[in-house]
Image: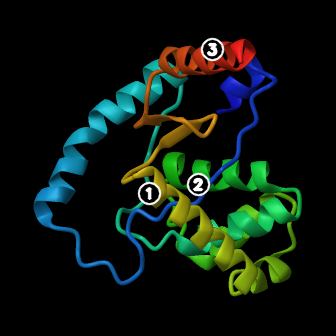
């Protein structure tokens, strides 16, 4: 996303919340877990070849809701981009458990937020409501996984796509908007 926004300054990135495994979900069936595990080599290869990133994913099946709520607080305090980067790096590259409140507080501090107010915000109704609104929006789009990118509120790009694909999609949307 950083690369897209650098290449296309007119593009605004808005991160939205999505829970893969909401609290209270039934246990993940072994065959589903196996399917996810079998797709990891391709995901890691795409990340390395297309984005120059080495992935080292955190634990599966965790409760991501506190991280999502923390994101809404960070956005409200003007530190959303830094917080999102820190949490993504912690989970996807450093294999940290982002359901651990101490890990999240460290990410918030790295983004310039104070630990105490950040932890208090994880129980604030307005940030929980913002997460719920994002999840409802994802359901309205029919999303069932991440990453997912919605362009101009009309076009859905599912999965970890190569950068040229995202670049082409953005060019198409910008061309359509210019023609309107």
Numbered disc 1: secondary structure: loop
Which SS class for mark 2?
Answer: helix
Secondary-structure class at tag 3: helix
Residue 65 is situated, as x and y percent measured from the top left of the image, at 54, 73
Kindly identify the residue that appears in the image at 84 percent across and 64 percent down. 76
Q: Which residue is mark 1?
A: 58
- Vertical placement of residue 53 versus 15, above or below: above
Image side of residue 138 versus residue 13, left or right: left
Neighbor class of circle 1 (other Cα within 10 Å; few <14, some 14-19, many 20+) is some
Count residues near mark 3 (Cα–Cα under 10 Å), then give few for <14, some for 14-19, many for 20+.
few
Q: Quadrant of residue 87?
A: bottom right
| Screen quadrant of the N terminus | top right
Q: Is residue 165 left or right of residue 86?
A: left
Asked whether the beta carbons under mark 2 and mark 3 sit within 8 Å of each other, the answer is no
The location of residue 109, given as percent across then percent down, is 81, 65
Q: Nearer the viewer, residue 159 or 57?
A: 159
The quadrant of the image that shows the C terminus is: top right
Q: Nearer the viewer, mark 1 or mark 3?
A: 3
Q: Which residue is mark 2?
A: 90
Give the residue displayed 54% in from the left and 14% down from the top: 168
Q: Are marks 2 and 1 in contact (CB under 8 Å)?
A: yes
Q: Specify which label sits upstream in the sequence, 2 or 3.
A: 2
Disc 3 designates what residue? 171
The first of marks 1 and 3 along the sequence is: 1
In the image, what residue occupies the spot 66% across and 77% down?
A: 129
Residue 43 at what x, y percent from top left? 36, 35
Nearer to us of marks 2 and 3 is: 3
When asked about the image quadrant of residue 120, the answer is bottom right
Which badge, 2 or 1, comes first in the chain's sequence? 1
Q: CA distance from mark 2 to mark 1?
A: 8 Å
């Amino acid at each position: 996303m950083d690369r897209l926004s650098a290449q296309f300054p007119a593009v605004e990135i808005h991160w939205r919340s999505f829970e893969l495994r909401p609290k209270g979900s039934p246990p993940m069936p072994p065959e589903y877990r196996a399917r996810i595990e079998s797709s990891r080599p391709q995901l890691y290869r795409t990340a390395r070849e297309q984005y120059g990133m080495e992935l080292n994913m955190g634990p599966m099946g965790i409760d991501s809701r506190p991280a999502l709520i923390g994101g809404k607080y960070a956005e409200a305090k003007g530190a959303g981009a830094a917080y999102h980067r820190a949490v993504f790096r912690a989970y996807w590259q450093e294999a940290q458990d982002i359901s651990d409140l101490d890990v999240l507080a460290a990410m918030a501090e790295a983004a310039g937020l104070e630990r105490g107010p950040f932890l208090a915000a994880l129980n604030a109704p307005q940030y929980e409501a913002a997460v719920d609104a994002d999840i409802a929006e994802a359901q309205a789009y029919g999303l069932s996984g991440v990453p997912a990118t919605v362009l101009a509120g009309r076009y859905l790009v599912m999965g970890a796509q190569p950068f040229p694909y995202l670049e082409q999609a953005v060019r198409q949307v910008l061309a359509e908007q210019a023609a309107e």
